[in-house]
Amino acid sequence: MNFDNGKSLGFGCMRLPMNGDKVDYEEFCRMTDKYLESGFNYFDTAHGYIDGKSETAIRDCLSKRHPRESFVLANKLSSPYFEREEDIVPFFESQLKNCGVEYFDFYLFHALNRNSYEKYKACKAFETVQNLKKEGKIKHIAMSFHDTADILDKILCENPCIEAVQLQINYLDYDDPGVQSKKCYDIAEKHNKPVIVMEPVKGGALVNLPQAAAKIVNELNPGASLASFAIRYAASLPRVFMVLSGMGNMDMMNDNINTLKGFKPFTSAEELAAANLRNIIRKCRQIQCTKCEYCLATCSKEIKIPYIFEAYNTYLSAKATHSEAKEKLPSQGGKASDCIGCGKCEAICPQGLKIRDLLSEITRRFGLK
C-alpha cells in the first residue's frame, strides 16, 4: 500500500447501520458498494466490535460480494482475547474465518498502553505477528494507541516492525494533556511512521456542538457539515494518510466521501476557528466520551454508561433542560445509581474518564435512586 497516496477515508466498522441488535445487512451492502465505487477501499474492524458482528458482517457484505484485491482490510489483536502465546495464532485464524479472507492487509496491536504493552511482550505477540507476516497472512503491521507520548516512543523504539500508528486525533483533543494527540503525533513523526486517525469527530461529539461553536463553523463554511470540518482538520496533518470514520448510514457516508474525495487542507482562518471551538466546548464541561462501548463489556450491572453520558451532555451543553435530559437517560439496563464502584470500566476506558465519579455526579444531579 502506498502511504504517500494522498488522503483517504477509512470505513470504521465499530459503528455500523443496525436493525435492532443485528447489523442491517441491506444497508451495509449499499454503503459498501457506494464506498468502493467512490474510490475508497479501507475497512477497519476488530473482534470485539458489535460483539463480533462487525467481522461477520464484513464477511457477508464485503468479502463474499467483492474481489479480495478490491479492498484493504484491517483487523486487530485485542488484549482480552488471549492470555498466552499459544492463544494468538488460533485467535488470528478465527478472525480470518470470521471475515472470510485468507490474509489481512493491516493487523494492529489493539489499544496499546503501558499496561497492555507488558502483556503483549510477555506473550511474544510481536514475534508471533511478525511470523504471520512472513507467512503472507499479514501485509502490514501497525498499532492503535491510547496513552502518553513517552510510552508511544518506547514502544516504537523497541518494535521497529510497526509500520504505521493509529492515533486519536481531532481538534478538541489535539492539545489535551490527557489524550496528548499532538505529542503522540510528534512521536510518530520522529519515528517516520504514517498515521491513521481514529475518532476524528470524537464519537459524534464534534457534530453535536454547542450553539456558539456551531455558529462559528457555519459562518466560516456555509453549507458544509460540522463533521466535514472535523475530518478535514485531522486529514490536514502532513503525516496522516488515512482518516477512519464510523459511518452508521448513507448520509454520513456521502458527506464523508464528498469531504475527502475533493479534499481541501485547513486554512489559517480555520485553524484559528478550531482553537476558538476548543475553548467554547471546554467551557460547557461536557464528558469526553466517544461511545466506543468498551466499558459495557465490563459492567456487571449492565449500566449503559456511554448513553447516560450522552444524555447528560445535552444538559451540560444547554441543548436540553434538566427534565428533558433526564428523559433521555436509557430506559433499559442499569441506572447510574446502580454503580458498585468496581472500577473495571475505568481500567479499560481509552479516554481515561473517571467514570465512577461521573456516574455519582449524574446520580446526584438527576436525583436517581
Image: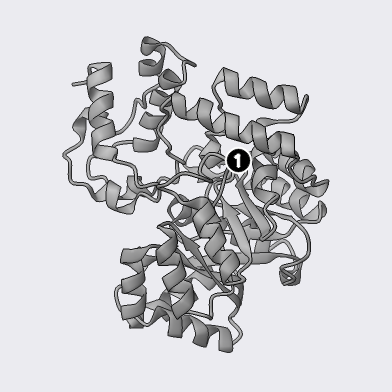
Quarter of the image for the N terminus: give it: bottom right
At 49% across and 16% down in the image, what residue appears? 319
Amino acid type at mark 1: Gly
Mark 1, residue position: 248
Residue at image position (49%, 62%) is 144
Tell me where residue 311 appears, x and y as whole percent.
41, 25
* Whether residue 58 can be seen here: yes
Relative to 148, is 215 on the left or the right?
A: right
- At horizontal 57% and vertical 68% (from top left) the residue drawn is 190
For residue 257, above or below residue 155: above
Q: In which quarter of the image is residue 155?
A: bottom left
Residue at the image position 67 percent from the left and 53 percent from the top: 237
Mark 1 crowdedness (10 Å alpha carbons): few <14, some 14-19, many ≥20: some
Nearer the observer, 243 or 195: 195
Q: Position of residue 275 (x, y in %)?
A: 59, 34
Residue 269 higher or lower than 112, as above or below: above
Task: Report the coloring of the rendering.
Answer: one colour
x, y percent for residue 196: 61, 59
- Secondary structure state at the residue bearing disc 1: loop
**Residue 334 shows in the view:** no
Q: In which quarter of the image is the C terminus?
A: top left
- Please name whichever residue, 168 or 67, is drawn nearer the observer in this view of the structure: 168
Q: Indicate left or right for 332 with 54 as reference.
A: left
